[in-house]
Image (cartoon, grey):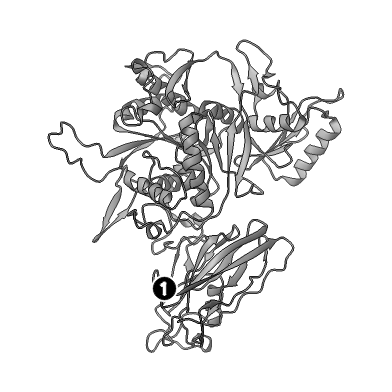
Amino acid sequence: MTSATNPPSGAAFITLDWPLKGDSVTPAQGEDGVWFLAPDDGSLKLAPFTGFEWFPKRPENGPFSNLVIGSRSDALNTLRRFSGPIFKLIYIDLPRLDVDDQSAGFAADPARRVTAWLHLARFLIAQSKSLLRRDGVVAVHCGDAESAYARLICEEVLRGQHVGTVVWQKAYGPQNMKGMKEFTDTHDLIHLFARNKDALPPVGLSRPPKGYSNSDGDPRGAWKAEHKGAKARRANSDFDTYQPPYRWELVDGHLPPGLWRISPFTGVIWGSPTEAGTFKFKVEVRDRKGKSTTRELQIDVAPDVAEPARPSIPWLFEQIDTKGELRISTETLPPARLGAEYSAILLADGGTPYTGDPIRPTSGRYWEFAKATLIDAYQRDSVYLGSRQPTAIPHPKQYAPAEGVLEIENQQTVWPGRVGDGSKRTTLAGYTEDATKHLKAMKALGLIKTEVSTAKPEPLLRRLVEIFTRPGDVVLEALSSSADLAAVALKQGRAFVALQGASRRDRELAEACAIPRLRAVVEGEDRDLENRTSEIRLSPDSYIPFEGGGAFAVSEVGGTFIELPKNEDLATIADLSDNDDLTLCKRVLGTAGFIPSELGTEGQSIEGKRRAIVIPPSEFLTPEIAAEIASSAQMSKAHDRISVYYFRSSEDLEVVNYSDVVRFYRVPFEMLQEGTKP
């Protein structure tokens, strides 16, 4: 039932009422996956994130991506009190009352089934409000049967902040059953609410000016490549050019993060490496007759090596003359300097290369660019040669202007799964079937062990991500099962937190689907699936192909570490079973929402803007240590906030504001009282 309430402003709001709404209960999930209402004793409890396992390894700096396994309630409570409002987009794919697997739904007590669902929906939406950035948005995804309830709860919690409700076409046709007494359910709804609508940037897709696109996923952004030919002859624009003689593919391993790709036509490797180390991979070359051979190579990345010289391109201005068996002639690749531009090229000979007559602009015209400009574009993998079969006429890319001049494409509230484009139908938001086939294809290739029938298509989630976030923002997937939003975030350059759940079913899905799926994304295996799985008819635009890169961690939610019982003033450490210094320091960091470093006494926040330092319980915080930390923070200015946690202090310590960015917290007493919200 609904009722009118009077907020302090005096404006009336319609709210939803249900049994036990005001009682001290909280939604919980049993080992069998069934949701129920558990008594809430009113105490404040914080559980740490523990046991971080990185894939492939921990990045040097944030923001950090993290799949969290454990109680979603505990995880959200820890995030809310200490990480604070860091999320630009929160996605809540609410369970369906009558469609989802009842063994993992609300079947424990049929009389309280809707009540438990309503408590869960309100709990998640209310928690999201405190986790959203001021310019953040929560997307509440639900079926038609749950839509009215979800909308009213959103209106109650986030009053007046409705951004829109998207109607997503999840299926393409009606059920073919005789005598049906109701319409076929072919849509879902996504209610979009802001934390503060006045703080939102324009809501829409950021698009470059017309004529620019990014069909090959160039990390430098949208581009166009046009060449009509110049009428005037210049000495440096009068030359012949030839097409690339071989085709290239990365078939195993991955390039150093920051290096874009191996160009499939030219064999050029370009980018700026962001991580040091030795990166091994295998490349394949193919000739015109389809014959192929492979070679294992590696690129060493270090901060102290000389920046390599730009490579020469022997086939560009003269046709190669070769014979013998096809082979890769590149035996080693030059080392790369960390953070510096890198350019190298793979070369082959033998076999049957692609050849042809020299190509020039059309009769009576000359190149619009100088010879040196074309060489530079090839060396930087910035030449367009055609989408499928390269032409011999190269088109150096012209990149779109800076983001400040991007145009905002306003959005409609109806998102079809596919849209017509002449005789073709291309993906807009995708269908549920696309998500299912995507996971089945990954399973057929051995990338995951099981698929999830409730998975959402990547184009749908990419659309939400592109509208409401920018690269580097942090997103939250509150009810993750197959890591749908997490996978899209990795591919789109966003950080994520995905909450997987603590039930037996949730853990099995994490091990069999979510974790291996994210590993496949990082390792560059989530691409070309439509050609690698003949038994699954997968449309190439039904998912986001990804060349690999990035990193993520898997962590657990531990037991309660800090507790403040109801009607008491002092928080206590609830569990001292493992009381060595390093374990306690890691628990403090995990409870405060920080990701521990390898040392275990320092940590970074999820969004990478805050740092934490823990003084071990065997040591004292002294005025000298406090002043040194504050001085170092003031000089580096690398973080917006530094939180210092300590168990004991010297008698002469007076906690003062040593710096604008440093705050001190006594463990456990001051952790629940103040938190470390930015």
Residue 12 percent coordinates (x, y): 37, 20
| Amino acid at dot 1 | Glu
Given the current orientation, which residue lies at the most extreme top position? Answer: 567
Task: Assign the N terminus to one quadrant of the image.
Answer: top left
- Between 340 and 357, the residue placed more toward the observer is 357
Given the current orientation, which residue lies at the most extreme left position? Answer: 179
The answer to whether residue 310 is left or right of residue 430 is right
Residue 506 percent coordinates (x, y): 47, 33
Residue 250 percent coordinates (x, y): 52, 64
Position above or below: 212 against 383: above
Residue at x-position 44% and y-position 26% = 32
Mark 1 nearby-residue class (10 Å; few <14, some 14–19, many ≥20) = few
Task: Assign the C terminus to one quadrant of the image.
Answer: top right
- Give the total of numbered labels: 1
Q: Is residue 457 visible?
A: yes
- Between 124 and 541, the residue placed more toward the observer is 541
Q: Is residue 592 visible?
A: no
Residue 336 percent coordinates (x, y): 66, 65
Position above or below: 606 against 217: above
The answer to whether residue 30 is left or right of residue 620 is left
Residue at x-position 48% and y-position 81% = 351
The answer to whether residue 40 is left or right of residue 434 is right
Q: Secondary structure at mark 1?
A: loop
Position above or below: 195 against 280: above
Judging by the rendered image, the residue that carries numbered circle 1 is 226
